[in-house]
Image (tube, rainbow, N blue to C red):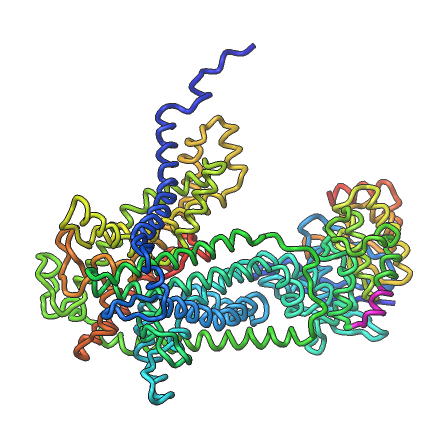
Amino acid sequence: MGAAIPSRSLHAPAGERGILALLSGAAGISVLCVAGILGFLAWFSLPLLQPGQLAAVLSWTWQPTSGRFGILPMAVGSLLLASSAMLLAYPLGLGLALFVNGLGPRPLVKHLGTLVRLMSGVPTVVYGLASVFLLVPLLRSSFTGTSGFSWLAAMLVLALLVLPTVTLVLDGQLRLVVPGLRLTAAALGLTESQILVRLALPQCGHGLKASAALGFGRAIGDTLIALMLSGNAAQVPHSPLDSLRALTAHIGLVLATDSQSQAYGSTFACGLVLFGVSLAVNLGLRGLRPIPEQAAVSVRLGPGLEMLATGLAWASAILVPAALAALLGFLLLRGLPTVSLALFFGDTPPLDALLHGAPVFDGLWPACLGTLWLVGLAALFAVPVGLAGGIHLAEFATGRAARLAAFCVDLLAGVPSILMGLFGFALILLLRRSFWPSANTCLLLSALCLALLVLPYLVSATRAALAGLPQELRLTCAALGLSRWQAVRRVLLPAARQGILGGVVLALGRAAEDTAVILLTGVVVGAGRPGALTDKFEALPFTIYYLAAEHQTPQELDLAFGAALTLLALTLALFALARRLGGGSDEAWRPGT
Amino acid sequence: MTKISIRGLNVSFSGRPVLRSLNLDVAQGGPTVLLGRSGSGKTTLLRAVNRLNECLPGCETMGSVRVRLGGAMVDAYCAGTRPETLRTRVGMVFQTPNPLPASIAENIALPLALAHGLGKAEIAARVEASLLEAGLWHEVKDRLNAPAASLSGGQQQRLCLARALAARPEVLLLDEPTASLDYQAARGIEELLLELASRYTLLVVSHGLNQARRLARDVFVLREGATLEAVGRELLTDPEAFSRLMDELF
């Protein structure tokens, strides 16, 4: 008999057990976050359960001045806007996916693929700004007697916003299916369009449904496009040219202007509805079977299907780049002339502002600083927790707890960002009512809520990067006698480094461009450079949003376009860096909601 | 009579040459067997005949490949030749069985409907005929609607053969058709090929000299994508020469 094995090799050493406990704690935070958001929403919606209150909220009139707080028009508005945007985005996304998977000529395909990925890096507020000054005037002059701010305007831009989500999910699915079929089918004499339409698409049932669900979730969760373009009249629209108000925009509008009256009570009901929708989308996605069903070919359908697919592919490949070029070209046209030192520092000498903290009044510098602080703080909170949670889910979690945590991470990723803001807002309300009467929204709160927003991206990216490593690597480590934590720390994490870093950079980009969260948690205009964590602050996306609606002079509008260009450059740079690092699976980047 | 005539064929992938100025004449019937070390370009040569290399990224083909189709030599690469049409006349069986994700019957019916535009009655007749020809009919006739993936490896390969035969091609390209099969199944396919050689021109890439000896009427050895050497039948039957070739190739 050999020597007894020392006991320490049979049990994880105490230090290691501590680390594993920390990791699972980090994964537990996602569960707590979801529970927290739901808990706050429910708690603040409780007063609505008093007699008569619920009926008042579930009514068709929103007139806070006369005490009527019906949210049904907004619910219908959200539904109409999201469905119509999807109705437009879905065929276009399908066309693009088909185009890049075989129907388009190869040189074009490469550029189009890059373009779609680039689209997913454009901040929502930038789309909003360009549309307010390009699309809306166009609609106004085409349909006289209307303001241009309408269901139609919001629907068109929202479709552009969710298009990358739809396209990338479908493309990912087709990429799994097509290569295995191409040689076989081509050897049988089938054309490229026959392969895609008759063989590949019928096998993509899962992707077809998942892209619809994800796209719808994105569309209904978006705040900024609805807020900036739909006109925000609390009514049920009768035509696409009428104004409407979405639930997300409603929350933003009510809470940004007024936190004292009874009106805000009903916003939590709106929040509950939105949360319910994301829950439904998520559960729906879970219910989809990823395995293609048998007999997944369609010969019987009409012979025109190939023609239709080819036409759709080409139409999408022309329309989408054209729309994007129009919006971004307009932005460049208006933004580029404004770029100068004065754009950032106004009349203040740049060196004074940079080195001595001299106040800047007519420049973007305070907003840039605010955004940097926000992103830095959010990363400080979210990155350690996100990485630890991702490691736990990929390497250690098992059983029901693991499934619950994974579900909560997915759910959190799908929750509209305005709900993170609402969560922060509710937190302040609670603090004020309890032991901190002077609590107010501030930089720290915004950063915390942003951290909540990017947490699921970090967890998912880390998890995916680790899960993508070959299983043999773990077997090798185990065979060499490494403990599981040793294997993770010394071998797996270094091997997955690039993917994880890519995920972190994407999360930074996401934090930099979000507007909806900070809208409710302390961002203002004219706060100057951030002094303390409990101060109000400025940020680039909010500056753009605010100036687009409230600019007093052409110079202020120039400032908005300059800010949009700066933000676009920042997020695209981060996006390019993330792609370079090889991180960020195609679905990971979902900009502003 | 020459069925396939290849002149000055160059194929490269992303600038890396795989085949360099090859010439080859394949006689009608056969089987003609292509031997060579792995990586010598046998599969690429085979795929050059039905233009399948074009489906892979970064491929560039130069030179001429002509196939006698319907009595006339057709330039496979000239602008007037549709690759899809060419592939319906020049069938192919892959190294690993590659059934489509559909039922047994649909595997054969689908290309007939889509690439040949045939009607229902004709398709049904051809499904049965080709399965009979491939020796699979009696095993599957009661479960034609079962998934093709439910067949065994050897059965799947015969299904793929039936699928190729159903198109009534003039040439069959076979890329190591028995490589992924066990001994029994492989011998079954080989016997089938010998039968088929009277009706089709067979060009077979093979991994084994023994198989070549059993199958081949003509044998060519491909070396590093650059030279093709005809090997006489006597070389295959002469034990000493045979073992020299064996040493060289494996």
Principal SS element in the magenta part?
helix
Quadrant for residue B19, please give it. bottom right
Please state which of residues A551 and B175 is positioned toward the viewer in this rendering: A551
Where in the figure is residue A483, as x and y percent of width and height? 45, 28
Vertically, is B239 above or below B43?
A: above
Residues in magenta, as a range: B118-126
At x 43% / y 43%, what residue is drawn?
A: A405
Camera sees residue B9:
yes
Q: How many marks?
A: 0
Q: Is residue A416 rendered to the left or right of residue B249?
A: left
Which of the image's four quarters has the C terminus of chain A? bottom left
Look at 83% across and 57% down and name the residue there: B32
Q: Which of B234 and A124 is in front in this view?
A: A124
Specify the farthest residue to the bottom: A144
> Up-down: is A550 above or below A461?
below
Indicate the quadrant where residue B23 lies.
bottom right
Q: Which quadrant of the figure contains the N terminus of chain A?
A: top right
Is A239 within the magenta? no
Residue furthest top as drawn: A1
Residue A193: x percent and y percent?
Answer: 64, 70
Image position, residue A399 (x, y; %): 50, 36
Q: In this view, does B37 lie to the left or right of A150?
A: right
Q: Is any part of residue A160 visible from this angle? A: no
Task: Confirm whether the magenta stretch covers residue B124.
Answer: yes
> Of residues B215 and A95, which is closer to you in this image?
A95
Residue B149 vs B51, above or below: the answer is above
